[in-house]
Amino acid sequence: MIERKLLLGDEAIALGAIHAGISGVYAYPGTPSTEITEYIQAHATDVRSRWCTNEKTAMEAALGMSYAGKRALVCMKHVGMNVAADAFVNSAITGVNGGLVVLAADDPSMHSSQNEQDSRFYGKFAMIPILEPSSQQEAYDMMQYAYDLSENMKLPVLMRIVTRLAHSRADVEVRNAIAQNTLNPDNERTHWVLLPGNARRQYAGLVAKQPDLSASSENSIYNKTIAVNEGKARIGVISCGIAYNYVMENAPMDLGVSVLKISQYPIPSNSIKSFATKCDSILVAEDGQPFVEEQVKSLLGAEYNLKGRLTGDLPRMGELTPDCVGTVLGVTIEQTFENPQNVMPRPPALCQGCGHRDVYDALNKVAADYSDARIFGDIGCYTLGALPPFRAIDSCVDMGASITMAKGAANAGVHPAIAVIGDSTFTHSGMTGLLDAVNDKSNITVVISDNLTTAMTGGQDSAGTNKFEAICLGLGVEPEHVRVVVPLPKNMEEITRIIREEIEYQGVSVIIPRRECIQTLNRKLRQQKVQKQ
């Protein structure tokens, strides 16, 4: 009997990885990738699945499991690839022992991100295979394929998905799980010790594998020509990943459209050249940046009639939609409503009862007394302090940047220079910046707003819970300038007094407002109520 499940794209990936015999998943929570690890945590007790401090530590731990001969999965959102890049790129040089899949969840249109970078460029840069599923079923099936490919090629495999696939559901046919690999540590040290002499040999081996990777892509079951017309097609569409669905919704045979689906990279150059000879023009439909379009343009030459994001035929930014793809294919798009009215926007806001609200109230009161005060923010739900009614932070760039930007501003003469960073973000990327500030005796005040969880992504464990005072002292902050407060309206006088005192201290000071996230607290109380019934 065939078993079918209704799964999110993230859940299909997670179940596919479980059934492919993974022994560990290593991840830092980040939308739209978070649900992959959460699903494995809930459904596979024999798989190591505790959250990591950041994406770099996740990548390195997974590489260690691969070294031991077992299969590992690394999950992150696209900007997490920037954090993991050092280990990720070098993992292509070391190669792998047990299968290793790196899952990068991109966020075109920046639904919950500060950019919309395309992770496929990282895979090309590292010269490793890339997979890009077009459906939940393909996402599930590709996991077994990816681990087999990884172990056959002795390379990590990058799997790239986008928000629409990660967070939409579909019916998925599932198979039986295979057993996990047995412990089998690699005995070939030269693969793993990247001294220059070894690294040069390893890199030469990686370059030598490129023809095999190209051949694998040319013959891949995930790269195929569909809806071929007799004779020459009016337009050929090279569709990648989820964009394949938008194309097929709009490509009936009578429009003279042929489709080349690409879901494995490097791009199948021979297939593309052959496809191009049978089409009057080509449209490249891909969600993200013009990764394939640029390569196809180089492959076919400037004289070929190529359309896509670079030509303006498809939007240069944001997600593709069935409508924008249909329009460029010549489909008449009917408007459902004659005069559609936009719903009034409802921007996100900090939860009522959130401790971050009291932190920003206190900071705004104190900052008002200083004409040049600057408050440097960071990545987390507290970034919403940039919006009304608080408008409290002046910057938010990347994980951990609040402390180092405050340090640089203070070095330039800004006073007071205040950094606001969350508990999970501090352990992810803030500790090294604080050490820099201590070593440089920078005149900054760091506020570690501790709500005892990783709140923005749903309440996962925070790596530094109950350790922040010890961490700050260990990094060299003077004990008398590590202050803990409880962010509540009744404590406002005490909080503002402490902030003023630490601003006037000529050096590094840390204030830790600590109160549990209102959402995780409510969940705990509901669970306790159910248990008592």
Image (cartoon, rainbow, N blue to C red):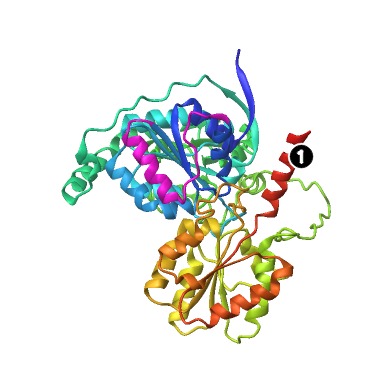
> Residue 5 in the image: x percent, y percent?
63, 26
Q: Nearer the viewer, residue 84 or 174?
A: 84
> Residue 525 in the image: x percent, y percent?
73, 45
Residue 416 visible in image = no
Magenta stretch contains residue 344: no
Q: Is residue 138 left or right of residue 476?
A: right
Which residues lie in the magenta part? 43-70
Q: Nearer the viewer, residue 288 or 112?
A: 112
Q: Nearer the viewer, residue 25 or 149?
A: 25
Amino acid type indicated by mark 1: Lys
Q: Which residue is mark 1?
A: 529
Quadrant containing the N terminus in the rendered view:
top right
Q: Is residue 163 above or below residue 49?
A: below
Residue projecting furthest to the bottom: 371
Q: Is residue 75 left or right of residue 95?
A: right
Residue projecting furthest to the right: 338
Provide the secondary structure element on which disc 1 rests: helix
Q: Residue at x 33, y 30 (%)?
A: 69
Q: Residue at x 32, y 43 (%)?
A: 92
Residue projecting furthest to the left: 197
Q: Is residue 406 left or right of residue 208?
A: right
Mark 1 nearby-residue class (10 Å; few <14, some 14–19, many ≥20)? few
Residue projecting furthest to the top: 1
Q: Is residue 303 left or right of residue 34?
A: left
Q: Nearer the viewer, residue 293 or 513?
A: 513
Tell me where residue 6 sits by quadrant.
top right
Residue 250 visible in image = yes
> Residue 168 in the image: x percent, y percent?
64, 39
> Residue 386 in the image: x percent, y percent?
64, 69
- State how many labels appear: 1
Magenta stretch contains residue 60: yes
Quadrant containing the C terminus in the rendered view:
top right
